[in-house]
Image: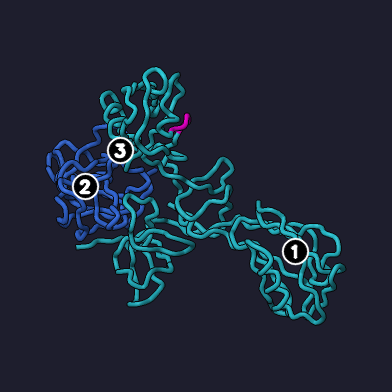
Amino acid sequence: MIQKKERVLAVAFICPTDIELDEPVLLSDDLTVKAIDAAASNMLVGTVAKHEAGDAECTVATRFRERRDDRVSAGAPAVGPFVFDATGKAIAFTAAVIATVTGTVEETYNIVTDSNDKLKIKIGSGSGQTFQLDNDASTTAAEVAAKIMLTATDFTASDASGYVKLTADDIGEDIEIEAIANDAYTALGFTVGVTNGDASHDPSAVAGMIVKQPTPATLTGTVGGPFTIVNGTSDAFKIKIGSGSSQEIDLTDGVGLTAAAVAADINTKTTDLTATVVYGQKIKIAADNPYEDIEIETVANNAYTVLGLTVGVTTASVVVETLEY
Amino acid sequence: MYQKLQDVIAIEVTCPSTVTKGDPVVMSDDNTVAAISGAGQVIVGTVCVHEADAVVCTIETRFRERRDDRVCGADATTVGPFVFDALGKVIAYASASHDPSAIAGVLLTGGDEDDVVETLEY
């Protein structure tokens, strides 16, 4: 017997065509779900409530109380669980993990007593644990791990295909490689520092799931083609997308250039944006990714008047779609 | 004032005779609950019907769905909170290994790998 609440929030998602009824599904992209393929994922949205054979869309009976399309995000969160920040904006929640640190140097190791034979490792809020390796010019990763494991607590050292690997015993515990005299860090390929295992926030603070990132920023010229672009007079174009570098190009000159030809020219010579032609033979520029502003930058002999563009910033939207508990 | 949703999933379970209406309870054995015995436990719901000294009670749960078709992903899986493994099978939530935000529900019955178990799911 399967017993269900009747008043669940059901949402249509894009899905693989072979998804099955009642299958629990994970959020995989904007308004897109997939069958479970990862253990203990916190991307679970609900179970498939309706799906026609071969269809690429399904209805999911979700675990949420509310669907919204008016939350303001901060910090460019991806789809997935979110928490609210101090100002009520949706920010990404990152789950805790079991921290691991793997040395970057492959065995064997030349360990010399009182020269490079020490390690000091701290797990979570515990005390630093000091280890001394044996004097051996051809120490293997397995031998290093075995020596550490003689006294190690709260973590496991192992031989990872010829490299020394440290794994915290519990989820959420940081691994800290601490400085110590005569350390073996260079030999093993370790670096002093902390590898985080903790969650970004307390999991009980998760308020729901971001199911769609904002629509990327767009900018449309006010003048329709065809265009006349003059070499050295009206061919310069300088644009910056998000935090990327300024991209300064010279458009191909010509008389009676179609909007499609100019858009293709822009696409060929730039990255992180896509130029298209919209109604009225106008050029539309769209950032390839959400959260990225479009900035038309000042440059001499530009094509802005020809294309109907204005120097300035088009700010990307930060409004996301959410499912909330 | 108490204000409650009317369409919660209520289930009948075995319980200690001392349980009291309104007690939050946790899973203790197959289809059996016990009063909370420690901090931070994942409760299955609260007792809504219990006759004096009876060893069965009805609890109103916090879940959206009750199922009896999930497949167990590991031997000796016990009742309590669970997560899905990479194959979509249910395994017991382990605080040392899983982030709490991955908890998908509560196992009402335990079992060994590939056994069919009963679940309550968010």
Task: Identify the amino acid type marked 1.
Answer: Ile
Q: Which chain is cyan?
A: A
**Horizontal and vertical percent for residue A176?**
43, 29
Confirm whether circles 2 and 3 share one chain: no
Marking on residue A159: 3
Q: Amino acid at mark 3?
A: Asp
Could you tell me the amino acid type at mark 2?
Val
Please state the chain letter of the residue tagged with numbered disc 2 in the rendered image.
B
Residue B21: quadrant of the picture:
top left
Specify the subunit that label 3 lies on: A
Q: CA distance from mark 1 to mark 2?
A: 75 Å
**A217 or A242: which is nearer to us?**
A242
Instruction: Look at the picture and state if B25 lies above or below A296.
Output: above
Q: Which residue is mark 2?
A: B49
Q: Which mark is residue A249?
A: 1
Element carrying mark 2: strand
Q: Which chain is blue?
A: B
Q: Nearer the viewer, mark 2 or mark 3?
A: 3
Q: Secondary structure at mark 1?
A: strand
Cα separation between marks 2 and 3: 56 Å
